[in-house]
Every structure is written in structure tokens, then in C-alpha cells.
Amino acid sequence: MRLDNRVALITGAGRGIGRAIAEHYAREGARVAVADLDQATADEVVAAIEARGGEAMALVMDVTSEQAVSDGVAAIVKRWGSLDIALANAGVQHIDPIHKLAYQDWLKVIDVHLNGAFLVTRAALQEMYKGGGGTMLYMGSVHSMEASPLKSPYVAAKHGLAGLCRAVAKEGAQHGVRSNLICPGFVRTPLVEKQIPEQAQELGISEEAVIKDVMLKHTVDGEFTSLLDVSELAVHLAAFPSAALTGQSMIVSHGWHMQ
């Protein structure tokens, strides 16, 4: 197993991409801290992991709270003695054109994605440096590379994560820490499902047109990126054996964006 006996923290792991990665990490032998705002969903993921013979713990964590993040990382170390992998995955979305965007809605998206990632990074690095190394991962997006209408705070935050990832790669190298950014295309999670009618209303088109002509227009095969596509990349990046792969933005998008 590629992650045997590694200790991993995943934020926003109660559903969607975060849950898929948590379960995949556990299948690969990692002990997984499932962090989420909602206790019930975190507990559900832990139960699913344990039912398959894996080891996991649930954490209620608001990634915008310094205390919650600090307490969560401390709980992981208290239980398992170290932290080897941390994935800043928690996120929210808001759909509005910039000229109608409320400042509070801008702040909320930036706070969860970017400020939350900073808090998780700071707490995780303190433990990784003590332990002689580790892997920091961030859930970016194709929107870390380019923009789409109606998503300015999300696009800005995802671009910001690319910068944070690269800064961690530079600073963390001397401590044995690697850092990479995962950049999926559209994955049909509850977050994306919510966007489909919102964009249809804002753009004045059908939901089918949003999927075909907006979300999947630039893919090579008209397919959504799958949860397994993303979780497989997350495992690969966590298991990669050297700093030959660090500070990179890895795109998994059915060809939507190519570098």
C-alpha cells in the first residue's frame, strides 16, 4: 500500500472530493483525520473507513478559526504521534457577477479557501518540521490557471493557493516538506450541482446548456472529471518519493486546460 502507516489530515472531508480522497488514502494504508464543519458527516466517513478495516478519526473543524485548526492538529498528534500529509480541501462557492458581488460574499469565499489553507498549512508545518518532513497538498482547480465569469472570489482564491503552494515548496524544502496543488476540472459534487441552476439563471440558458456549453465545453471528451480521477492523483502526490515533484500545479480535467 502506497501510504502505509502515514498520518493524513483532510479538511472538508465529509463529502465530495474530500471524502473520496479520505477513503482512498485509507485504502492505501493511511490513518486519516476526517475534518469537516459537520460532525455527522465526518462521523459517517470515519464509519465507512472503519467498516473496510481502515483507521480514521473525525474532527469538527472550521478552517477559518485559528483555535479550531490548532486544536484539530494537536488532537491528531496526540492520537497518532505525527502528521505526515495535510490536504487543504475545504471550500465554498458563490455565483455572482463582480458588479453585483457583496463584499461579505467575497470575504467568505476567500476566508475559507485561502485563509483557511494558510491556517492549516501553518499548523501542519510546525508538526512536519518537528518530524523531519511531510507533504502539503492543496485543492486548487482549473480556476487556479484561468478564469470563468461569475466566480471572481473563487478564481482569486484558487490563484492564491497556487502562490501559497509554491511558497511552501521553497520554504519547506530544507525541512523535507514537499507541496503540490491539485487542479481538477468540474467534478459532479454537491458544490457543482448547486452551481448548475445558479448559472442557468444568471446566464439565461438551460441547465443542460450550462453543462454542455459552459462546464464541459473545452474538455476533449465532454466528460466530468471523476472523484476517482482526483483521489488517484492525491494518492500519487502524497506517495511521491522525492522533492523532484514539488511546487507544481497538477491538472486533472479531461483536457479542459493544458500546459
Image (cartoon, rainbow, N blue to C red):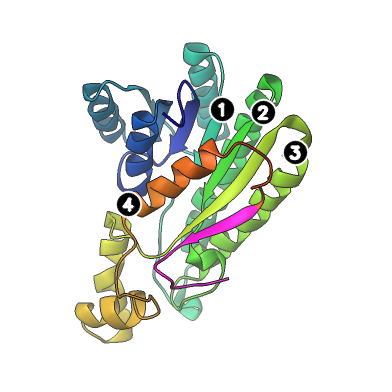
Residue 177: image location, x then y, percent: 67, 35
Where are the magenta residues, as a range? 248-259
| Residue 166 position within the rendered picture, expressed as x and y whole percent measured from the top left | 69, 52
User: Quick one: label 4, few (<14), some, or many (20+) residues within 10 Å?
Assistant: some
Instruction: Look at the numbered disc 2 and give the secondary structure of its residue.
Output: loop
Front residue (pair 16, 245): 245
Q: Which quadrant is home to the C terminus?
A: bottom right
* Disc ID at residue 173: 3
Give the Cα separation between the discs numbered 1 and 3.
Answer: 14 Å
- The circle drawn on residue 133 is 2
- Distance from disc 2 to disc 3, alpha carbons, whole Å, reads 9 Å
- Is 229 placed above or below 21 here? below
The numbered mark, 2 or 4, whose residue comes first in the sequence reads 2
Q: Which mark is residue 227?
A: 4
- Mark 4, secondary structure of its residue: helix
Earlier sequence position, callout 4 versus callout 3: 3
Q: Give the percent coordinates (x, y) of residue 18.
A: 38, 43
Q: Earlier in the sequence, mark 1 or mark 3?
A: 1
Q: Which residue type carries mark 2? A: Gly
Residue bearing mark 1: 84
